[in-house]
Image (tube, grey):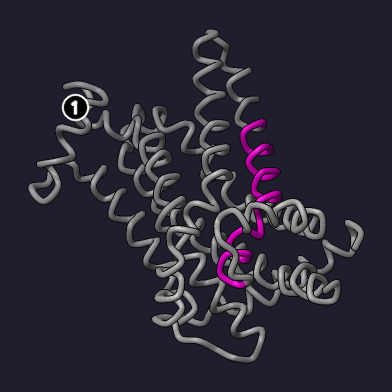
Amino acid sequence: MNAFEQVAVAWQALLRSAAKLRRAGMWIPLLVFGATQFLVLASLWSFAHPLVSWFMVPLLHRIGGDGLLRYPNVFRVMPALFGQADLALGATVGAISVGALTIRFAAGARGTPIGAGSALGLAARRALPLVLANLPFNVLVFALSFGLDWWLASRGSGGAVRKFSGLVVLSGSIVLQSVFFFVTCEVVLAGHGVLGALAAVPRAAARGFWAAMFLGVLLVLPLLPIQMLSGRSSMLIDRGSPELVGWMLVAQIVIELVIWFLLAGGATLIYLTLIEERAGAER
């Protein structure tokens, strides 16, 4: 299919996925991931609470010294710290949760619905392949996100350049996501191992890259206002509203979960339409 036909398929897949947003049961796999995100954010926000202070205080002290432990300094670095933790969670817990959600979307599309518990069990049994098959994408995004920032900081680049780098990171992340978009489907639907799933990346990207790119660009838009505000966390703190930084991250998690839901559903339905069926026809 050409790019326009792929985009048309992606749009239909998005609409079909969005229609299931109101089905509470479909959210169960992602809520496991969301719970870990909120747990990390709560630990940063309330690092002095007795329940978490025994490990959060030493951790933050190692990161930023005594100054970071004084209110409201932790809110200044909270977006960056949570962002790093979120990448790690997405690469592990997120990979398994999306695997389970992919199984549920595929089962529904095939007319053989499966329960959330069974889907999570199947994904858990494929946990290692899911994590490792998605590892190249996550490593590349991490290197792009933090490597470019480190390189610009080491060169003493100005604020304008640093802001432009954010656009480079965002664009590069969407392209990488589009290339590896169907890796989870290859693991849980096609039954490939790590090497098999990665070997299938070029074939899948050749058949569905523009569909993946369309969804990636469209679904990143709701996050842009939050990302812009997070970059101004110091301004909010200086104006006497440090907790607003934490609430912005709460909103970010909620929006991210919706995006993960739609991306998982979209990837699954596009895979079943453009990749799995065509591969079967070729055989």
Q: Position of residue 59 (x, y in %)?
A: 20, 33
Q: Is residue 181 magenta?
A: yes
Q: Image quarter for residue 112?
A: bottom right
Q: Image quarter for residue 211?
A: bottom right
Q: Which residues are magenta?
A: 168-189
* Element at label 1: helix
Q: Is residue 246 magenta?
A: no
Q: Image quarter for residue 186?
A: bottom right
Is the residue marked by circle 1 packed among few (<14), some (14-19), or many (20+) residues within 10 Å?
Answer: few
Q: Is residue 32 left or right of residue 23?
A: left
Query: Residue at point 49% right, 20% down?
Result: 150
Q: Residue at the top extreme?
A: 156
Q: With respect to residue 246, does 58 lie above or below?
A: above
Q: Is residue 80 left or right of residue 154?
A: left
Q: Main secondary structure of the magenta part?
A: helix
Q: Is residue 58 left or right of residue 98?
A: left
Mark 1 — residue?
61
Amino acid under disc 1: His
Q: Position of residue 177 (x, y in %)?
A: 64, 49
Q: Is residue 183 left or right of residue 68?
A: right
Q: Position of residue 274 (x, y in %)?
A: 80, 69
Query: Residue at point 77% right, 67% down?
Result: 275
Query: Residue at point 41% right, 45% down?
Result: 88
Query: Residue at point 55% right, 8% down?
Result: 155
